[in-house]
Amino acid sequence: MAFGSKKKAREEQALKDTALTTQTAATAPDEFEARQRARALRFDKWQSGESGPVNIHNMPDAGVPMALFKNAKAVSDAGRVGTGLGTMTEGANPNFVAARNQEAQMTRDTNASGMLEDYVDNATTANNAMMGNLAGIGNTRNMSLYQIAVDRLNNYERNKKPSFLKQLAFSMMTGAASAI
C-alpha cells in the first residue's frame, strides 16, 4: 500500500467519524424536547389507562390545579353570607334553610367540578396537539438524516474513480467510436 493511499484512508476515516458524530448529535433530541416527549408520554399513558385508573388525582401535573380547585372551593364556601329573603326572617323554617344551603352547596360543587373538567379537557387537547407536533419534529429530523445519507452516497458515487478495467473498456469504446 502506497503512502498516498494510507493518507487517503486516514482522511476518509476522519470524514466518516465526523459524519457519524454529526449524525448522532442530529438524531438526539435536545433536553427540552426530551422532557416534553416524556411528559406527553406520561399523560398519554394516564389518558389511556395504562398507568392505572383514569382519575384526576392520578393525572400527571395535576397537583397544582387540584390544590387551586380545593382552595377556590373552600374560599367560595366560606364567603357565602346568607341565602336570600327566606332565611332573613326570624321565624324561617329550618328545613327550608337547610334545603336552601344544600342546593347552594350543590351549585357551587357543580360549578367547581365543571371548571376542573374544563381544565382536564384543555390539558388533554393540549397534550394531543403536543404529541402531534413532536411526531412532526421527529419525522422532519428523520427525513433530514435520510437526505444527508442520500447526499453522502451521491457524493461518494460521483467522486469515485472507475476501476482500471472500466477505464480500459471506456477508452477502447471511445477509440473505436472515433475510428468509425
Image (cartoon, rainbow, N blue to C red):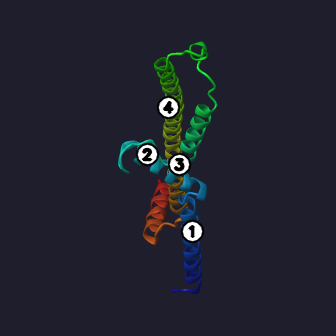
- Mark 1: secondary structure: helix
- Outermost front residue: 91
Task: Specify the label residue 44 is tagged with.
Answer: 2
Sequence-wise first label, 4 or 1: 1
Residue found at x 57% / y 63%: 25
Q: CA distance from mark 4 to mark 3?
A: 18 Å
Q: Position of residue 78 (x, y in %)?
A: 61, 34
Q: Is residue 107 above or below residue 159?
A: above
Q: Nearer the viewer, mark 4 or mark 3?
A: 4
Distance (Cα) linking label 2 and label 1: 33 Å
The amino acid pointed to by label 2 is Asp
In this orientation, which residue lies closer to the viewer: 62 or 84?
A: 84
Q: Position of residue 177 (x, y in %)?
A: 47, 55
> Within 10 Å of the Cα at label 2, are there few (<14), some (14-19), or many (20+) other Cα atoms?
some
The quarter holding residue 80 reads top right
Amino acid at circle 3? Asp
Distance of mark 4 from mark 1, alpha carbons? 52 Å
Q: Which residue is mark 4?
A: 113
Q: In this rendering, is residue 84 above or below 145?
A: above
Other residues around mark 3 within 10 Å, as few (<14) / some (14–19) / many (≥20):
few
- Label number found at residue 61: 3
Which residue corresponds to mark 1?
Answer: 21
